[in-house]
Amino acid sequence: MKPIAIIGAGITGLTAAFYLQRKGIPVTVYEASENVGGVIRSLRQDGYLAEFGPNTILETSPKITQLIRDAGLESRRLDPDPKAEARYVVRYKRPIAMPNSPLGFFTTGLFTAKAKLAVLREPFVPARRDGQEESIAQFVVRRLGQEFLDQAIDALVAGVYAGDPYKLSVTHAFPKLAQLEAKYGSLIKGQILGARERKNRGEIAKDCAPKLSFDEGLQVLPETLKERLGIAVRLNTAVTKASQTPGGWSVDFR
């Protein structure tokens, strides 16, 4: 059986390697840095637990539940207090709760009337069909306006990727957003019309999905996968070249 090389020990690479190894397929994960998990970094200090990257996992699919179970992390799972449903962003130098319903959106002081009208207009914004790749920022501004990007999406992207929405591809970072526009011509139409399809797949919309972490933060997941993979994970090993050969691929590293 041919071995498989995975470049990058982010959560996607580790998960792929974990399940390949469980199937008895030889696999090696090459990671240029000294840590696994990509931008996932947790720190406990002075009684507080802080996240440098994403702060929670959204349990949108049974596959996520299965991964936690297969990794042996069910006992370390940390679910939020049901009473603590509000999420906040800072505006006007004070925390303001993010709206969690259509009525809440139109009554919140987080967005101006102009931004609220832009959301109402979104179903009538023509879908882009030229195949050109867009950043998350370009996509959101085109469909929802600059204010929605600045006050909502920027905070969301920071919480998920700890990244810059102007540099992240919407197709790769949030593929379902791009798919909603491609299939339904609108994000709002897609959320409504796609509800039945998500139910059939056993998936849950992000705004309704349970949030979870672990007793020592999200870093518990990649670190646990690393432990399960053992010597299959090679840290401080940068891949310099990947070349296709008659029998598959060869990888050069340093």
Image: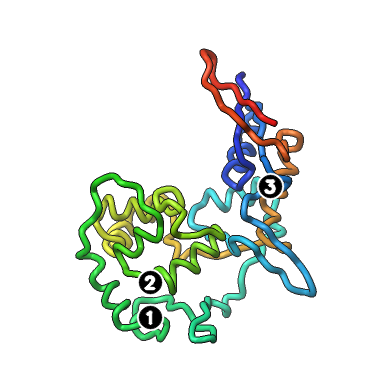
At 65% from the left and 63% from the top, the residue drawn is 52
Residue matched to label 3? 36
Look at 67% across and 40% down and name the residue there.
Answer: 32
Query: Which residue is painted at 30% across and 62% down in the image?
Result: 142
Image point (58%, 39%), residue name: 16
For the question of whether residue 22 can be seen, the reply is no
Q: Position of residue 40 (x, y in %)?
A: 64, 56
Q: Earlier in the sequence, mark 3 or mark 1?
A: 3
Return the residue at label 1: 111
Residue 75 in view in this figure: yes
- Mark 1: amino acid: Phe
* CB atoms of marks 2 and 3 within 8 Å: no
Give the residue type that dot 3 points to. Answer: Val
- Residue 59 x %, y %: 53, 58
**Of residues 196 and 20, the one drawn nearer to the viewer in this rendering:** 20
> Label 3: how many residues lie within 10 Å, few (<14), some (14-19) or many (20+)?
many
Labelled disc at residue 148? 2
Which numbered disc covers residue 15?
A: none
Q: CA distance from mark 3 to mark 1?
A: 38 Å
Vertical order, 74 against 1 (above or below): below
**Which corner quadrant holds the N terminus?**
top right
Please name the amino acid that badge 2 sits on: Phe
